[in-house]
Image (cartoon, helix red, strand yellow):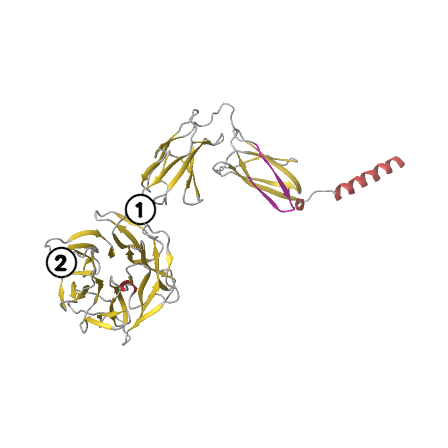
Amino acid sequence: MKYTHIICMTFLVMLFSCSEERITEADFGSIEGKVVNAIDFSPLANVKVFTTPGTSIVFTDKDGNFKISKAIVGNYSVQTQIENYTSKSEKATVSANGTASIVFELKPSTATNNRSPLTPTLLFPLDNDINQNIGLNLTWSDSDLDNDKLTYGITLRNDANSDVIVYSNIVSPIFTPLGLAYSTKYYWQVSASDGINPLVWSSVRSFTTKSFPNNRFLFVKKVNSNNVIYTGDELGNELQITASDANSWRPRKNNQSKKIAFIRANGSQNHIYTMNPDGSGVFKVTNAVPVAGFNSEFINFSWNTSGNQILYPYFDKLYRINSDGTGLTKVFQTPNGKFISECDWSFDGNKIALKVNGTNGYNAEIYVINTSGEVINTVISGVNGAIGGLNFSATGKKLLFTRDISGFEEINYRQLDTRIFECNFDSGFTSELDVEKAAGTLDLDVRYSPNDAEVLFLSTSNDGFSTNKIMKFTLGLTLSRKLLFSGVIMPDWE
C-alpha cells in the first residue's frame, strides 16, 4: 500500500507540472517575407526557407512570397536555399500573435566555369570627336563567351561641372543620353554585367558637342497649355530653348548683351526674365512691379540698344529697369488712364513708341515720347479696331505697326482685316505696306529685318482656328512673300 501511494503522488506531481508548462495559441507568432534577385529585384520562386531552431520548411510562391504560420515565440535564424544563388540568413524575432517580416536579396552564385563578359569596345563617337550633335547615339560592342544575357551601364561626366550621370539597365549596345549641352566636352564609360560575375568596364573616351547654332529667328509654340520659346533658322530648322512645363512667351533678343528677354508666368503674375541664346542662365529681372495690362498675350516690352536696360508696361505706367534687376524707374504714365500694351525703344535711345488702349483693347492710340516722357509725335488715334505691332526702323525715322481696317470690335478681341502700316516721320505720312496679304487673313506682330530691307510678321486666317504662319517679305519686291515657320506665334528677328 505504501508503495502504491508513492506512485500515485508522483503521478499527480507530474500531472500538475505538465499542466503549468503547456504551450497555448498565445505563445505562437508567424514569419513571412519575400525573396528577390539582388541584381534586378525580380521575385524568386521555389526558394526553400527554413529556420533554426526548426519550425516548418516552406517554399516561396511565384511572387517570391513565403509564410511560416506557426512559430513559437522567440528568436530565429531564417535561411534560404536555391540552386545557382548564394544562401542567406536573416534574424527574426517572433512575438505572441505577431508577424516578423523579412526580405531576402539573393545574389547569383558565381559558377566556377562561368566567364566574365568581354570588355566593352566603344565604337561611336570616336575618342576626342568634336562637333557632335546633342542627340547623338552612344554605341559600343560586347559579347559573352557563355552567351549570358548582358545589361549595360553608362557613366557620363563633363568638363563644365562636377555632375555625374549614371544610366543603368540598358539592354542594347546603343543609347541616346538626353539633356546634353552645347559646346561641352563629355567623358563616357560603359560597364557590362552578366548578373553573375563582377562588372566589366570599358576604357574612358571623350567627345565634344557642337556649338549652339546662331539662329536669327525666335518664336513661340503652344505645348499643351503652355507657351514655349523656340529658335530657328531660315531653312526651317527649329530648336526648343525653354521648358515645356513653364509658360514663357514674347522673346526679344539683344545681340550686344547676347541675351534673350521674355515674359514668364510666375504664380499669379507675369515677369520679365532673361536667358542665354541656348536657354541656359535664366534670370528673373522684374520683381516689385510685374508686367501687366489689357491682355498678357498682346503685351510687349523693349531692350535698349546696349542690352543693359529694358522698358516694360504696368497698366497705365511705363517702367525702365536694368537687366540685372536694379534701378527700377517710372518713365511715363498715360494722362487719361489708358493701358500701355506695347513699347519700342529707338536704336539711338532718344525715342519710345507706345501703343495705349482702353481696358478692352480698343480705343487705341500710338504716339512717340522722348526720354523725359513728353509726347513728341502722334502716329494714329481716334480709329476703331485693334492696333499693334510697334517696331522702329534702324534709323528711328520709320515705325511699323498693324491695324484692323475693318474697325471691328467685340469682347473676344477678334480681328477681321489687319494690315501692316509704316509711318515715315520725315514726310509725316503713314501708308499701308503691300505685302500681298490674302483676303480673310490677318498680318500681325510685324518687325523689320536687321537690315530694314525685309519685314517679318505673323499671318493667319481671321477665323481664329487656322494655322499661324511666320512670313518674310522683301520690301519693294513683288511675289516675295515667303513662309518660314508654321504653327508658331510671336516672331522676333535680330
Residue 468 x %, y %: 21, 56
**Left or right: 359 in relation to 417:** right
**Quadrant of the rendered structure where residue 125 is?**
top left
Q: Quadrant of the N terminus?
A: top right
**Pointer 2 or 1: first along the chain:** 1
Q: Nearer the viewer, residue 414 or 88?
A: 414
Labelled disc at residue 319? none
Residue 48 x %, y %: 56, 33
User: Taking the image as drawn, is residue 225 in sight?
Assistant: no
- Magenta region: 87-103
- Measured in 3D between alpha carbons, the distance from the residue under mark 2 to the one under mark 1, in whole angstroms, is 33 Å
Magenta portion: prevailing SS class: strand
Residue sitting at x 18%, y 66%: 403
Residue 156 x %, y %: 41, 40
Return the residue found at the far right. Answer: 2
**Quadrant of the rendered structure where residue 72 is?**
top right
Q: Magenta includes 89? A: yes
Above or below, 153 relative to 306: above
Labelled disc at residue 435? 2
Q: Magenta includes 391? A: no
SS class of the residue under badge 2?
A: loop
SS class of the residue under badge 1?
A: loop
Residue 353 x %, y %: 24, 67
Which residue position is annotated with label 1?
Answer: 212
Residue sitting at x 21%, y 67%: 387
Above or below, 388 relative to 141: below
Above or below, 220 relative to 334: above
Residue sitting at x 36%, y 51%: 280
> For mark 2, does the 10 Å Cα neighbourhood hold few (<14), some (14 to 19), or many (20 or more) residues?
many
> For mark 1, does the 10 Å Cα neighbourhood hold few (<14), some (14 to 19), or many (20 or more) residues?
few
